[in-house]
Image: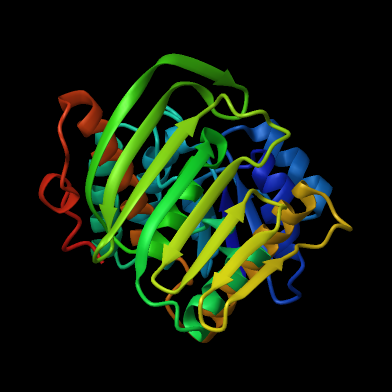
Amino acid sequence: MEIAIVGTGKVAERNYIPGLLRHDDVSLTLYSRTRERVDALGERFGVPVVGSLDELLGREPEAVFVLTGEHERLEVTRALLPFGPKRLFLEKPLMARGGQANVVEQDFWDGKALLEEANTAGAEVAMVFNYRFFDQTVRGRQLVEERDFGAPVSVMAVSHYATWSHCIDLILLFAGPLRRISAQQGTRAHEHPASGTAPDIAASFLIGQDATGTLLGTNGIDWGFPLFELIVAFERGRLHFRGLDEEMEVLDSNGDVHEVVMPSRETSRWHKYDASFEKSIDAYLDSVRAGLPPPVPGIAGLRELQFEASLKRSIAEQRPVIPDDDFPIEPVR
C-alpha cells in the first residue's frame, strides 16, 4: 500500500513515519517544501523523497497524509486536489490560520469549502483526532454501548489550548451535536510554547438532545497537571476523564457500580500519546484495506470548527449562537 506524506514536521518524524513503517504492506513517499529537512528524513528512514506534488501523486498513493501546520493546511490540501488523490488524511484541527488556540470564523467556512471541493474531486477525507484512541476513551465508548447509561444529561470540561480541539471533539463524540452556545472571553492572555498566546474562554452550551454543558479554555494550566478534564453525565452513569495518562472514573447506577479504569503506569504520558497515534494509524489503514469509511471522517473536523466558530461569534456579538443557523454544515458529507 503506497502512502504519501506531505509535511515533515516533528509529529511526522516522531509519530506518523514510524507508525506507518510498522506495517509490512506499507511503502512511503515524502514531500515537503523544506527540501533539506525532507531529504534528511528520507535518508534516516530509508524512504524515497520527491520534489513536487505532481511527482508525489504520480505514484498513485492509496492515501495522502497532510501533516503540515494547521496554518497552511488549507493551501496545501487545495493544491493536492487537482492531482486526484483517492483519500486525504488530515491532522487536527482541520485548519486554523492563526494557530489552534486562535480559530476564527473564516477557518470554519474555509474548512466547509475544502470538504465540498474534496467531495467534488472524489477524494475521501479523514481526520486523526488520536485522543479517540487512548485506552480510557476506547473503554468509555465501550461502556456507553454495553451498559444502560441512558441519554447524556450534562458535560463539564476544562482544557489547556494544547488539547483544545481534541477536548471539543470528545465532547461532541460522547454528547452529540452542538445546538446552542454562549461564551465569554477573559481579560488575560496566557502564553505557552505549544499553543501560542490566547485569552481564557468560558462557554455554556446545549448539546445532544437535552444535555447542557460548560467548557473552560486556557493556556494557564500547569503543563505537569492533567491538560484536560472531561465529565460526561448520563441519566444512569457518569464518565470522568483526566488528561492523557490519568485514570477514568466510572459511575453506574445499575447496581451501584463505582470503578476506576487505570492506564498502565509503566510508561509516561508521552508514551501513551505516541501509542494513541499508532492505534489511530492502524485503525485508518484497516479501513483502507477493507474499503470502509474512515474511523474519524472529515466531517468530525468540520463539526469541531463549527463549535469554535460559534463560540467566537458569541463572544464577538455578545449573544447566544445556534450553529445550524449561523454555521450550517449540510450538505457536506
Of 187 and 282, the residue lying toward us: 187
Q: How is the image coloured?
A: rainbow
Of 277 and 228, the residue lying toward us: 228
**Left or right: where does residue 203 sit relative to residue 85?**
left
Residue 76, image quadrant: top left
**Left or right: where does residue 66 sit relative to residue 84?**
right
Q: Residue pushed farthest front?
A: 256
Residue at point 76%, 62% (across, down): 263
Residue at point 37%, 41% (across, down): 74
**Left or right: where does residue 227 sit relative to residue 144?**
right
Query: Can see residue 115?
Result: yes
Above or below: residue 153 compared with residue 111: below
Quarter of the image with the N terminus in it: bottom right
Q: Residue pushed farthest left?
A: 325
Q: Residue pushed farthest right?
A: 266
Q: Position of residue 158 (x, y in %)?
A: 50, 40
Residue at point 76%, 75% (across, down): 24
Q: Position of residue 114 (x, y in %)?
A: 29, 50
How many numbered callouts?
0
Of 188 and 103, the residue lying toward us: 188
Query: Can see residue 48?
Result: no
Q: Position of residue 230 (x, y in %)?
A: 52, 51
Q: Position of residue 137 (x, y in %)?
A: 58, 65
Quarter of the image with the C terminus in it: bottom left
Q: Residue pushed farthest top?
A: 188
**Left or right: where does residue 16 sit relative to residue 22?**
left
Above or below: residue 330 compared with residue 189: below
Residue 155, image quadrant: bottom left
